[in-house]
Image (spheres, helix red, strand yellow):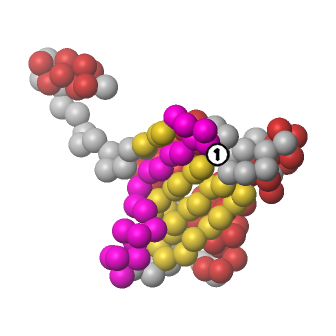
Amino acid sequence: EQGRVAACHAFGVNLPPPPESFPYGIYAVPEISTVGLSEEQVRESGAAYEVGLARFRETSRGHIMGVSSGFLKLLFSVETRRLLGAHIVGEGATELIHIGQAVINLGGTVDFFVNNTFNYPTLAEAYKIAGLDAWNRMGHG
């Protein structure tokens, strides 16, 4: 990415500002990946928020794979309903985080996860489960 930006700069191509949120991945066992604000950061800001949680064992793909651990946690603003952060621990975390990254950078809300279909059976279905978990407590906007 740095090379592309440097080349664009050298040729006078104007680029939009970089996205505010980019993902972090730790390639360990289990994998850990995060994007956006942490729950601690949201709590310290004083903003009202809701957490949506999905355990991989709750997904059909998790059952098929025999996954007994791993989870996805989503943090949403109660006021704007926007996704503030996504945090994943478990199988494929560094692959799954990009859905959260896209939604954060595009200003997406909890309703995106509730109203969209995710391939089935995949671990990405955890986004819908976590979205519904938060949506049920936030109200149906």
Q: Quadrant of residue 121?
A: top right
Vertical comparison of 138 with 107: above or below:
below
- Residue shown at the point (60%, 49%) measured from the top left: 89
Kindly state the secondary structure of the residue where label 1 is placed.
loop
How far across and how far down the image is residue 35, in percent?
Answer: 44, 51
Q: Report whether 121 appears left or right of 140.
A: right
Q: Report whether 96 appears left or right of 62.
A: left
* Nearer to me, 106 or 27: 27
Which residue position is annotated with label 1?
Answer: 90
How far across and how far down the image is residue 97, in percent?
Answer: 54, 44
Q: Is residue 41 magenta?
A: yes
Q: Report whether 77 appears left or right of 71.
A: left
Quarter of the image that includes the C terminus: bottom right
How far across and how far down the image is residue 119, in percent?
Answer: 76, 41
* Nearer to me, 121 or 53: 53
| Amino acid at pointer 1 | Gly
Q: Is residue 28 magenta?
A: yes
Q: Which residues are magenta?
A: 27-46
Viewer can see residue 103? no
Which class describes the residues within 10 Å of circle 1: few (<14), some (14-19), or many (20+)?
A: many
